[in-house]
Every structure is written in structure tokens, then in C-alpha cells.
Image: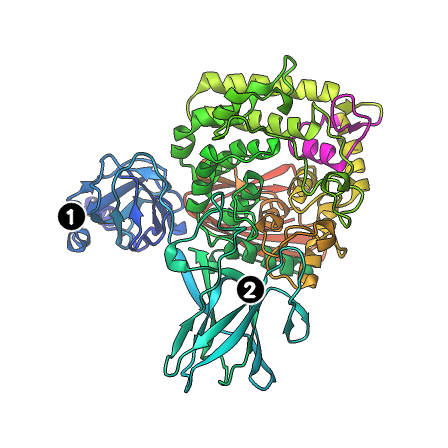
Amino acid sequence: MKKYLIILILFFLLAYAKDPVSFAPSGLMVEFIRNPGEIKILDLNPEFTWIVPMKAKYQTAYQIIISSNRNNAKKNIGDIWDSGKVTDRNSSEVEIGITLKGNSTYFWKVRIWDIKEKPTSFSEIQSFKTGLKKGYSTTQNRFLSTLISPQKIIKTADSHYFIDFGKDAFGTLILELIPVKDDTITIHFGEKTSGSDQIDRNPGGSIRYQYVKLPVTAGKARYIIDLPPDTRNTGPAAIHLPDSFGVVTPFRYCELENCSFEINRANIFQKIYTYYFDESSSSFTSSDTVLNQIWDICKYSIRATSFTGIYIDGDRERIPYEADAYINQLGHYYTDREYSMARATNEYFIKHPTWPTEWILHTVPIFYNDLMFTGNLESAHEFYNELKFKTLTAISREDGLISSKNVNEEIMRDLGFSDPKERIRDIVDWPPAQKDTGWKLAGPNGERDGYDMVEINTVVNAFYYRNLVLMAKIAWMLDKTEDSNFYQSLSEKVRNSFNEKLLDRVKGVYIDGENSEHSSLHANMMALAFDIVPDEYISSVIDFIKSRGMACSVYGSQYLLEGLYKSGENDYAYSLLTINTDRGWWNMIRSGSTITMEAWDMKYKPNSDWNHAWGAAPANIIPGYMWGIAPAKPGYAKAVIRPQLSSLKYSKIKVPTIRGTILAEFRNIGKSKEYLITIPGNMEGDFIVDGKKVIKLDPGFNKIRF
């Protein structure tokens, strides 16, 4: 009897081992593209990504099938490629072992083996098309056009309408009318009102207003407004839009004059353009309604300004700048599971650098972010030699510190400048002091906090140190051990020289540069953000930073907040995030903008615009630093969650990653705190309490109470 029982148990075990479990991988991506459709994948050795089901816990193996037609894929016939069972935990950016043909259509799916080494069901089938091989190239995602109906329509007078679409966006206007006679309608477009129910015809700075005369023809039903181009953002340095877009402008409001037709939600639309974006990928809410609104405007800013497919500096010029791109990139990663736009922008800078020294020194950090959030080495490998130049080691002196005065034509060529006679120049923050700009309303110090611009510049050398640290990590990930050791050793030398020559040890704060007698917020916040400050001086540096308030631009606030959160100063950081003065994000909302502004207020930069995503730092600061959610290993193989929620009584957040979604919720329950954390399958996690105690997280639901 016992023998038969053992045989029966073995039979059921074998049967279970052969039958796949009911769940399957999801979230398929080819070369970062989630829904390829008609997009042509440019890499003929593409990488494949999927989300491992939480029920599987961890992936122990996978099988990829690629077929020439959907029918074969349904039958599990991989006539193009069948990997078989591959013992490997990696589920993101997995490269297959063959080269595909160009201009072809393929169908693929994947299954995995779970933590118990049981196979799952196959995923759904995803089709994709390839382009022609033209060397290394990043595949960019598609653009989306969306029709937005008005939120408010007011007939202000006979034949005169005021329309509010709710949010500023880049696009044009569509009217669906059937005129009974030929006529002309005047259409006003604007981002700002001058009061109730009227567009501001003179909004100031670079806030947009324009009008067009629209001839209407008897019997014609549909009009797509043809806007005149702006010479400021259609020049050779600007990112040009696809011809199919026509000319777009940012606007929230429009007015129609001499319009004898009844206007309603069914016959007028704001046609907007954005890069592919999934609104449901991320969310944030908390017990602070002001913070919630700040998150909303910053998240929307990332989406709304994506209309060129490359991160740009707003509508005035539509030119990519590295510092803007750093803030855009992180905001994009935290608001959508999208990586192709960031990578295309990173690679654009290799041959299209901009003039500020610190902007050049943003190149290595944005490539490092790409590695950490995607786990894909291709881009860093392809442009590794160019990245070495971008560290600016060529302009260092014997003690390791750098000066932009040491640049020559050869170095400018190595940096990617087409005109080697051009020169990089230190910027610190923008706009600079009034004496440099001549702006009467910029204030006595601009956004540099009175910075003393000397040759050996503290801010520049802080960025330089950070580049060396990150370049050492990039080299290590690319198995370039000798280079990694070199950059690590050089970074230590620079840090020592930095603290020897730029730290006033009597006052316990950093000066603006070698032999300077002035200390600014910028010199100190950059040293803090980049982990340069010796332990014994952290307290005095933080005290000085707190004494300066928000004496930096919207760009500088990124690093101010990074430094504060990294130092555990979450109460002060939270107060800056929600500050109710004219130097904060609430002021942007109060001013009427629905996309973050180029400056805190028009008086700080009189030519400022209302559509600049470099003002959207909270889109990454809230999830990445306040909630402390970040990749601890490349491609989110491991996540860290280090919440610093200050006085919030409640918060809930949804963060996209290449491996799936992280969900986190916090409740302050009387004398205890409760965290509910869900991490996706195939991801390790560390939850850090009070900056020190580490709690290991498993895929799925984790409840933490203390």
C-alpha cells in the first residue's frame, strides 16, 4: 500500500511539473517600445523585456519564441528563434542570439520558470517590425495626437467666445463648422488671461500669445488652424517637428471673434501632440493638498513638453540643454515606463553639446541614469570614449581641480563642438546676477546668490568630482576595470584637493572658488548633494544652506533638494517643496500656469516662459527622494525604498520601473507608522527605516509597522 501511495504522489508531482502555472509574463517591450505597432525597430539585435508575475516571485529561467507569423507563434513554433529554456534571472533588456532581417515583421512571446522552477504560461503575442540596419541607433517611440474638449465655453458677446481647455499644451485648434457664407473669424491663442474670460494680449516675457485670421468657406465642415512659424524656435539649432504636425504653439485658451456659429464641446478641440505616454503608469497623493497639486503640475509638465521627442528648454528656442535633460530624464523615468526619449536625448548631446561647463558635466550623469534605470549597456558602450572626454579630465591641473580657462581647440573638438573656436564657460545657475544681464527686475543677485566667479570654481569642481565617481561606476559595469580604478583614484584626489582648497575650515562652509572670500548657497549645496563634505562639517554646511532659503533657480533646486534629502533634512526639504512664497512651485500654480515655469516668477527672469520642464524637479524629487524609491542595482534588479515623509500623515505612490510597478502606501496610525509596499516579480528590495535599519522586501505585498 505504501509503495502505491509513493507512486501516486510522484505521478502528481510530475504532472504538476509539466503543466504551466496559470499566470504569465506581461508588459512586453522590444528596444524599450511597449506597443511597437508600425514603429520600425532599428536594432536588428534587439533587446526584449517583460514583467515577471508577482506570484512567480523570482525568475529562474526563460524561453523566448520569435516567429515569422502569428499562427506559428500561437503554436509555439519559433521558426525564427527559439531560445529553449535559458537559466537566467534577467528579465529586462535580454538580447537574443541572432540577427534579424531588416524590413520584416516578427511575432514574439515569452514564458518564465518561477521560484519553484515551474514554467508559467506564455505571455500574449507581441508583433514588431524592423527597419534597415544603419549602424548603432536608438529606436524612438511614436508621437500621440489627442483631441481635448473644452472645460469651459463662455459667450462673452455676440459672435465672441472665450474657451478654456483646462491645461496648457502644444498643438493647434480644430473647428468643425458648416458656414452658410464665406467669412473671416479671428482666433486668439494664449497661455495666460488678463482677468476673467479674456486672453492676455500682452502677457510679458516668452509667455505665448498670438492670433490668426481664419477665412471660412460656405459648406466646409472642418478647419485645422494653420499657425505661422516662430523664427525663435524653428532655427537650425532647434529640434524640428515632423512635417505632419504642422506648426504648433502652447496654449490653454482661445477666443473667437466674428464667429456667427454656436460653439460647443462637439465642434471645437485643442489638438495636442506628445510623445507616447501612459498616464496610468504613475500616481501620487498625500495628506497635503498643496504637495499633491505640485506633483500634478510637474508630472503633466513632463508629458506636455515631450512633443519634440527630445528634451528641450521650453518653447522659446526648442533647443536641448544637458542640465534641462537631467531633470527631464529623471522626471520621465518616475512618471512613465519610458526610456527611449531619454536615451535619444543623451545620445544627441554627444555631437551637440552646449556651452556651459556644468552642462557638459551633466552628460556622464544622464548616461549613468540610463544604465541604472534600464540595465542596458549598449549606449554607454557605444559612446564610452566620448564620455571620457565629457568628464573634462583634459582641463585638470596637477592637484586634480579643473578650470574652463584651460580649454583649447583640440579639447573643444573632442567634446563634440563643430566650431573648435567656441569656448565653454562656467554658468553656476541661470539667470546670473543683474550686473551680467542688465535686467532691471532680476534683483541684485539673480539666481547665483552673489556667486564669486573665479577661475577654480567650486560648483564646477563639485560637478567634476561627481563625474569621476559615476564614470568609475560606468567603467566597472562595462568591465573596464583599469579605467574604473583610474577614475576612482582620481575622484579621491579631487575630493581631497576640493576640501583642502575650497573649504573654509574656520567657518565650516565652502567658498565659491580658490582664494574667494564669498560663500554662496550653490557652493555648499553642490558639495552636499555630491557627497563631498567631510562628516565633521556636514552640520555647519547644512546650517549655512538653511540660512540661504531658496536662493537658487528652479534648476538649482534639484540639487538643493537632493542634498537635503541625502543628509536626512527631510523636514526642511518638505518646507521648500511646499513653500508659499514667490520662490516656489505653489507660486507657479497660483500664477495660473499649468506647466512648470522657466523661473520662479517673471520678475526673476523677465523673458521667462510658462512651459519649461526644467522647473519640474518635484516629479523626481517626490518619488526618488521624499519616498526614496530608486534603483540600487542596474535595471532595478534591486530597489531601495528610503522614505522621508516628514509630517505627512498619509501618502500613496505608484512608481513605474522597467521590471514593473512599485506601489507604496504610508499611514500614520496614532503612535505607530505603517507602510504597505508592493514590489514586482524578479526584483529584490531594501526598505530603510530611519536611514539605517534595513528590512528585506520580497516580490509582492509587504507590510511594515513600527
Residue nearest the observer in this picture, 244 or 506: 244
- The percent coordinates of residue 70 (x first, y second) are 19, 55
Is residue 509 located in the magenta-colored stretch of the structure? yes
State whether residue 517 is above or below residue 493.
below
- The percent coordinates of residue 350 (x first, y second) are 46, 33
Determine if residue 607 is in view.
yes
Residue nearest the observer in this picture, 420 or 429: 420
Query: Could you say whether the residue bearing mark 2 is in a helix, strand or loop?
Result: strand
Q: Amino acid at mark 2?
A: Phe
Question: Do the numbered discs 1 and 2 sit on residues whose CB atoms are within 8 Å?
Answer: no
Across the whole image, how many numbered discs are drawn on residues? 2
**Seen in the image, is 366 located left or right of residue 1?**
right
Q: CA distance from mark 1 to mark 2?
A: 52 Å
**Seen in the image, is 603 located left or right of residue 375?**
right
Instruction: Tell me where the magenta segment starts and ends, as one range.
Output: 507-535
For the view shown, which residue lies furthest in the top direction?
Answer: 398
Query: Could you say whether the residue bearing mark 1 is in a helix, strand or loop?
Result: loop
Q: Amino acid at mark 1?
A: Ile
Q: Residue at 84% across / 27% down in the picture?
A: 507
State which quadrant residue 562 falls in: top right
- Which residue corresponds to mark 1? 77
